[in-house]
Image: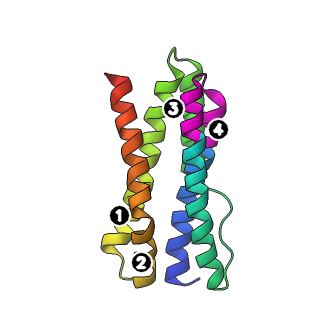
């Protein structure tokens, strides 16, 4: 595995974590606006992961189709917390915002610290969309906390 595909595979797994988590959350919340937002965020994560998977494939390697163990555990933890909460939407938003933090940090690291020009260019192409998604969830979390 090349350095390029290794880094892209790591990003893909984080995106799959986000996609799965948003998809699951969309089915668990009762407020339609949240379900629609979560479904949109899941589609965005899937689209970026598909683009990165194409890049991995162009290097003759197979892209991961799943996420990370940490992502699966976070989702399970959130499901349990939400089931015991009076405000499941707020629980999901807070945990999804943390997932956005992880994804944003990973893309920012590749954008600013990577010596790999190809990975840096790919991160740069998707960073604005990743940042918007992060900021949207951060702002929603703040509004719900107020």
Relative horizontal placement of residue 23, taking residue 139 as reference (left or right)? right
Q: Earlier in the sequence, mark 1 or mark 3?
A: 3
Distance between the Cα atoms at labels 3 and 2? 32 Å
Q: Mark 2 = which residue?
A: 121
Residue 113 placement (x, y as % from top left):
31, 73
Prevailing SS of the magenta stretch = helix
**Can you see residue 63?**
yes
Mark 3: which secondary structure? Answer: helix
Mark 1: which secondary structure? Answer: helix
Distance between the Cα atoms at labels 2 and 4? 31 Å
Mark 2: which secondary structure? Answer: helix
**What segment carries the magenta color?**
21-38
Circle 3 packing at 10 Å, graded few (<14), some (14-19), many (20+), is: many
Q: Mark 4 = which residue?
A: 24
Name the residue at 43% across, 70% down.
Answer: 125
- Give the numbered dot on residue 9: none
Is the residue 4 above or below the residue 14 in the image? below
Which of the pair 59/37 is nearer the observer?
37
Residue 26 placement (x, y as % from top left):
62, 34
Distance between the Cα atoms at labels 3 and 4? 10 Å
Figure quadrant of residue 56 = bottom right
Name the residue at 55% across, 62% down.
Answer: 48
Quadrant location of the N terminus?
bottom right
**Can you see residue 68?**
no
Name the residue at 63% across, 84% down.
Answer: 58
Q: Mark 1 = which residue?
A: 108
Residue 73 placement (x, y as % from top left):
58, 42
- Give the numbered dot on residue 92: 3
Circle 4 packing at 10 Å, graded few (<14), some (14-19), many (20+), is: some
Name the residue at 56% across, 55% down.
Answer: 45
């Amino acid at each position: 595995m090349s350095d390029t595909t290794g880094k892209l595979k790591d990003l893909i797994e984080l995106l799959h974590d986000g996609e799965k988590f948003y998809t699951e959350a969309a089915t668990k919340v009762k407020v339609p606006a949240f379900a629609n937002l979560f479904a949109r965020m899941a589609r965005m994560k899937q689209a970026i992961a598909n683009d990165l998977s194409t890049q991995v494939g162009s290097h003759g390697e197979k892209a991961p189709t799943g996420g990370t163990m940490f992502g699966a555990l976070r989702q399970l933890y959130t499901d349990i917390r939400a089931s015991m909460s009076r405000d499941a939407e707020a629980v999901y938003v807070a945990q999804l915002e943390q997932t956005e933090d992880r994804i944003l940090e990973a893309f920012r690291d590749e954008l600013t610290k990577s010596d790999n020009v190809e990975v840096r260019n790919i991160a740069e192409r998707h960073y604005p969309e990743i940042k918007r998604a992060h900021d949207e969830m951060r702002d929603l979390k703040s509004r719900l906390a107020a």
